[in-house]
Amino acid sequence: MPALALTLCIGLALLAGCATKPPESPALPASPVATVPACPAPVACPVCAVCPGVVPEKPRAETLEAVGFETITGWRDDQLSQAWGAFRTSCQALRARQGWQEACALATEPGAGGNPPSSTTQVREFFEKNFTPYRVANADGSTQGMVTGYYEPLLRGSRVKRAPYLHAIYAPPEDLLTIDLSAINPDLKNMRLRGRLEGQRVVPYWSRSDIERGVAPVAGREIVWVNDPVELFFLQIQGSGRVQFDNGEVMRVGYADQNGHPYQSVGRYLIDKGELKLEQASMQGIKAWGRANPDKLEAALNHNASYVFFRELPARPGGAGFTPDGPLGALGVPLTDGRSIAVDPRFIPLGAPVFLATTQPNSSTPLNRLMLAQDTGGAIRGAVRADFFWGFGAEAGALAGRMRQQGQMWVLLPKGMALPKPNQ
């Protein structure tokens, strides 16, 4: 019996033996090519008198739902004036984009709408007059999500390889391909694939292990050499940082590209291996474990096959690399300590104000702030998901490393602006 006929017979037999009789369907016209052999007699269902029906898939919740400002947790308690500078910074990138022109003109051009707001009350009035808040929800309708923290670290390094500076920060290798899927389908914006050519085929790019072993063609792509592989690993997670040389000179490096492999949590790996307890799997705990277990370090780091490549950033006015400006985020503007977050741009428009209601690191103390979505990250996936930028240096790193809180988000969009279509 041909496979198609057998499949049809099995399906009909199960339906006849397990379900109530379906409504009769019109007879199908005879095939001019082949006839389907007669099916065997229906058999009784061995398990159930009536087979369960197909459960319809639960519809996905709307990502953004318009609400009133009065529904935002902590909206009237935040010192909104402290976020005004970060919003104006976002407007450097947004003011030419559709939907943002008028709001950004009011914020950045005094002549467009009188004097710009300066006090918290004036900033609140500005947003309530010109913006609509949208509550952010996950696909299942929940409005809670994970909030982590990140920062700009300082590493020690050298422009030439010499002890103890033996670990390279690489620029993107020349064989790394980036395939922009939006060129194929506009609905796939923000979706890019990385790979390399192997003959006539595009295959996944080399993993972290391959790159560290020298399999990938990264020789000659070294930007700078640093002294600590664990600090280098966390630099890749943060996405930007500073490298100080022995003479006091400072280089800033920023994200340039990534090898295309998904981020895998080393903390979760160490928990699953019994190396750390859940409460120990912070950035500080992982660093301490790595220095205490150098023989196991390579395998743990290679569990995360994702690898980030960098570029040297030009020096900014201020001298020695220590300037008041934060690192450049994915929006292309400097981040602001305590007012910038990384988001998943499939759901949250880059540059938009986002009110975040969460708690302080390892605490139940409320942390409710107007933030600006100015960055992205490989581990930042999902609608209600944010990475809080704490700033530069050891103190910021201590806060970022301990932050793993639950939170809610509301995105503020200019009135009348068409909602972005979520790219699931």
Image (cartoon, helix red, strand yellow):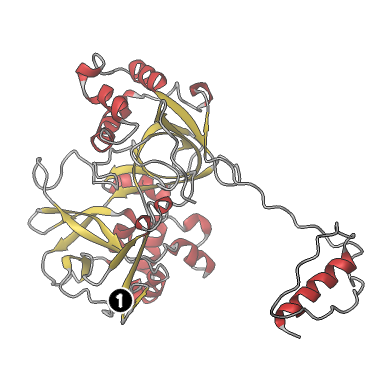
**Considering only vertical position in the picture, is 180 above or below 299?**
above
Residue 277 location (% of width, % of height): 52, 60
Residue 22 location (% of width, % of height): 86, 59
**Considering only vertical position in the picture, is 100 above or below 76?**
below
The quarter of the displayed image where residue 361 is located: top left
Query: In the image, what residue occupies the spot 90% across and 74% down?
Result: 42
Q: Residue lying at the far bottom in this picture: please name it.
A: 1
**Considering only vertical position in the picture, is 332 above or below 14?**
above
**Considering only vertical position in the picture, is 385 above or below 259?**
above
Q: Is residue 79 left or right of residue 334?
A: right
Q: Is residue 196 left or right of residue 159?
A: right
Q: Which of 204 and 372 is in front in this view?
A: 204
Residue 112 location (% of width, % of height): 23, 18
Q: What element carries label 1?
A: strand
Looking at the rendered structure, the number of numbered marks drawn on it comes to 1
Query: In the image, what residue occupies the spot 34% across and 56% down?
Result: 183
Residue 289 location (% of width, % of height): 40, 65
Query: In the image, what residue occupies the spot 9% across and 41% down?
Result: 317
Q: Nearer the viewer, residue 285 or 16?
A: 16
Give the amino acid at mark 1: Leu
The quarter of the displayed image where residue 349 is located: top left
Q: Is residue 256 left or right of residue 16?
A: left
Q: Which residue position holds label 1?
A: 197
Q: Residue lying at the far top in this picture: please name it.
A: 114
